[in-house]
Every structure is written in C-alpha cells, then in structure tokens.
Image (cartoon, rainbow, N blue to C red):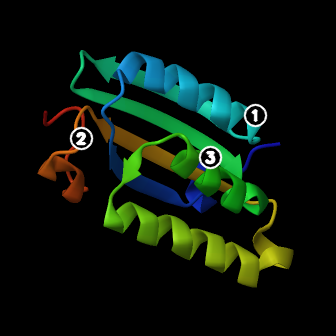
C-alpha cells in the first residue's frame, strides 16, 4: 500500500539530455518500473522539455538513483545533492523509513544548457 502524500518526501529534480524527450520518457518509465517505482505522470513539450513524476519505496533509493544516472541524463548539482541526502537519510533511518514512499518530479531539458542549473524552472515556465 502506498503512503499518504502528507508524509511523502517530494523532490523536484532537474536534468539535461541530448536525447529525444519522447524516447527518454519511455526509457525512464521502463527503468523506473523495473527498479520498483511507480510512474504517476509523464509529459513532453516537443524537443525542449520532458517531465516525469514518480514514486518509489525508500528502501530502493540507491537503485533508483543509479537507474537515473545510468539512463544517461545529466542531473543538476542540486538534484545529485537531494538524491544523495535522501539515500543517506533512508540508510540511517532504515527501520523507520525503509517502507516509506518518496516522490520525485523530474524535469529534463532537451539540451545541456544552463537551464539545468535552475531548479525553479518547470514545464509551465518554458
């Protein structure tokens, strides 16, 4: 059973990729599902932006992080920091948090431009 949204950590991550956003969203959806995640929504805006919203059990945090990195996207520095902190916190609190749910809203820009450095950008602002 999935946890309530009130207790679910929500991370807003940004990344860049030179890949076609539609193919990338399909690839990431499969990778996340194979890693134990749930894809809640996904969208693209032409070749500019892709967004994927997903959840996962916190005990699989490292696998999810590794899957994102292995997919070839360039996570922003802040996104790496947020994921590393979530994984470290989950490891330290494994008894209490292992089966808690984490939620991520990942925005991927179609090129490796400076936009990835700004975590405040979203589909609505592009």
Helix, strand or loop at label 2? It is: loop
Helix, strand or loop at label 1? It is: helix
User: Quarter of the image holding residue 84?
Assistant: bottom right
Spatial separation of the CA atoms under disc 2 and disc 1: 26 Å
Q: Residue at x 76, y 41 (%)?
A: 36
Q: Which residue is mark 3?
A: 67
Spatial separation of the CA atoms under disc 3 and disc 2: 22 Å
Spatial separation of the CA atoms under disc 3 and disc 1: 9 Å
Q: Is residue 88 above or below residue 35?
A: below
Question: Which one is nearer the viewer's eye here, 62 or 4?
Answer: 62
**Nearer-N-terminus badge (3/2):** 3
**Numbered badge on residue 14:** none
Q: Is residue 65 left or right of residue 17?
A: right
User: Quarter of the image holding residue 61?
Assistant: bottom right
Q: Mark 1 packing: few (<14 Cα in 10 Å), some, or many (20+)?
A: few
Q: Which residue is mark 1?
A: 34
Residue 69 x/y as whole percent: 53, 51
Residue 85 x/y as whole percent: 53, 75
The reply to whether dot 3 and dot 1 touch (C-beta < 8 Å) is yes
Question: Which one is nearer the viewer's eye here, 80 or 3?
Answer: 80
Q: Mark 3 packing: few (<14 Cα in 10 Å), some, or many (20+)?
A: some
Residue 80, visible in the rendered structure = yes
Q: Is residue 23 above or below residue 123?
A: above
Q: Which residue is mark 2?
A: 122
Question: Which numbered mark, 2 or 1, is in the foreground of this view?
Answer: 1
Q: Residue at x 24, y 40 (%)?
A: 122
């Amino acid at each position: 059973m999935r946890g309530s949204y009130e207790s679910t950590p929500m991370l807003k991550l940004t990344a860049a990729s030179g890949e076609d956003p539609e193919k990338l969203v399909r690839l990431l959806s499969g990778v996340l599902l194979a890693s134990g995640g749930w894809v809640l929504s996904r969208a693209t805006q032409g070749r500019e932006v892709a967004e994927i919203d997903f959840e996962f059990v916190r005990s699989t945090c490292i696998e999810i992080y590794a899957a994102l990195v292995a997919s070839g996207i360039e996570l922003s520095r802040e996104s790496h920091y947020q994921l590393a902190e979530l994984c470290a916190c989950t490891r330290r609190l494994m008894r209490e948090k292992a089966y808690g749910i984490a939620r991520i809203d990942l925005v991927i820009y179609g090129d490796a431009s400076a936009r990835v450095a700004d975590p405040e950008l979203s589909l609505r602002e592009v």
